[in-house]
Each structure stands twice: as structure tokens, then as C-alpha cells.
Amino acid sequence: MSEVNDIYSEIIMEHARDGRHKHELETETCSAHGHNPNCGDDITLHIFLADGIINDLSFTGDGCAISQSSTSVMIETLKGKTITQAKEIVDIFVDMIDRKEISKEQKKLLKDAYAFQNISNMPARVKCALLSWKTLKEKLEKY
Ligand SMILES: [Zn+2]
């Protein structure tokens, strides 16, 4: 592994370990449940929407390090974004995992979530990484 990859695995492990976004919300407007039967990942997203903005976001549930970390990074990336922006960023993340070309601007929008780029080389882990992103987008489609 190159040094760059090490930095990225560092980001992933850090988020998997620290549970800063793993709790319920005092006030939530909706929640979304996602399950990945391939691995057993089971996540509930707690969402507080106001005026078309994701004011607050957190998660509860269990799963492998990749799914926990990916959820935590997603929350950090999307909190405070409008619903429209959040959906766009989810699409960029999915494209990246699908190995589609993404622009420098798009890479900037992903922030730490770019750390998951190499997951595309680990097919068994792809569903773990995508679980919470797809779960959130499905929910946001209703707004
Ligand atoms: Zn998993």
C-alpha cells in the first residue's frame, strides 16, 4: 500500500472507532433503516430536516467497520447541506465506488468520503460502504 492509501485507511479506521455520530437525535423529523444481508450491517439514520436543509444527522445500529465508518463519514460530509446538495453528493460517492470518473470539484465535495475510493477494489465490501448513502438518498427522494 502506498502512503496515500495509508492516510485513507487511517480516516476509515478513525471513523469506525470513534462514535461521535452514533447516537439518537433529541429531535428528528424522520428516520431511515438500511440493512445489508450480505454482511449483517444494520443501520438506522436519524434525520432532522428543516427548510430543505439537513440540520442534524446521526445513526444507530451495528455492522462491520466499513459500514460504521462510511456512515460516520457520510454524516460529517452531508450535515448542513440542502437536500438537493446531499443527493448530488451521494450520487458522486456512488459514481466513485462504481469506478466512474469524478472531477476535482466533485472530489472536493466528497471531503473525507474520498477515502473510500479503494473500496471499489474490494467487491465484498462495496455494499457495506454504500448502505447508509443509498438509505439516505432513498429517504430524501421523498422530500
Ligand atoms: Zn459490512
Image (cartoon, grey):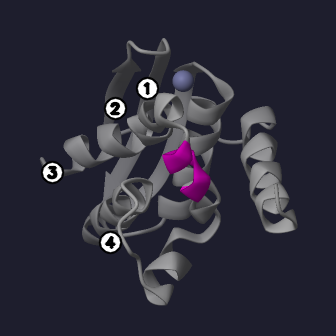
**The quarter of the displayed image where residue 6 is located:** bottom right
| Quadrant the N terminus occupies | bottom right
How far from the left and from the top, in percent, is residue 52? 26, 65
Q: What element carries label 1?
A: strand
Q: Please name the amino acid that badge 2 sits on.
A: Ser
Query: Is 105 a magenta residue?
Result: no
Label 1 within 8 A of ligand 1 by Cβ: no
Disc tally is 4
Inter-mark Cα distance, 1 to 3: 17 Å
Inter-mark Cα distance, 3 to 4: 12 Å
Sequence-first disc among 3 and 2: 2
Taking depth in this image into account, of 131 and 139 the one nearest to the observer is 131
Identify the residue at the far left of this view.
Answer: 142
Name the residue that disc number 1 marks.
44
Name the residue that disc number 4 marks.
85
Judged by depth in the image, the label closer to the viewer, 4 or 2, is 4
Above/below status of 8 relative to 58: below
Name the residue that disc number 2 marks.
31
Q: Please name the amino acid that badge 3 sits on.
A: Glu
Stretch in magenta: 117-121
Residues marked 3 and 2 touching at CB (< 8 Å)? no
Above/below status of 20 relative to 95: above
Taking depth in this image into account, of 117 and 111 the one nearest to the observer is 117
Q: Mark yes or no: residue 38 visible.
A: yes
Judged by depth in the image, the label closer to the viewer, 2 or 1, is 1
Main secondary structure type of the part rendered in magenta = helix
Sequence-first disc among 4 and 2: 2
Sequence-first disc among 3 and 4: 4
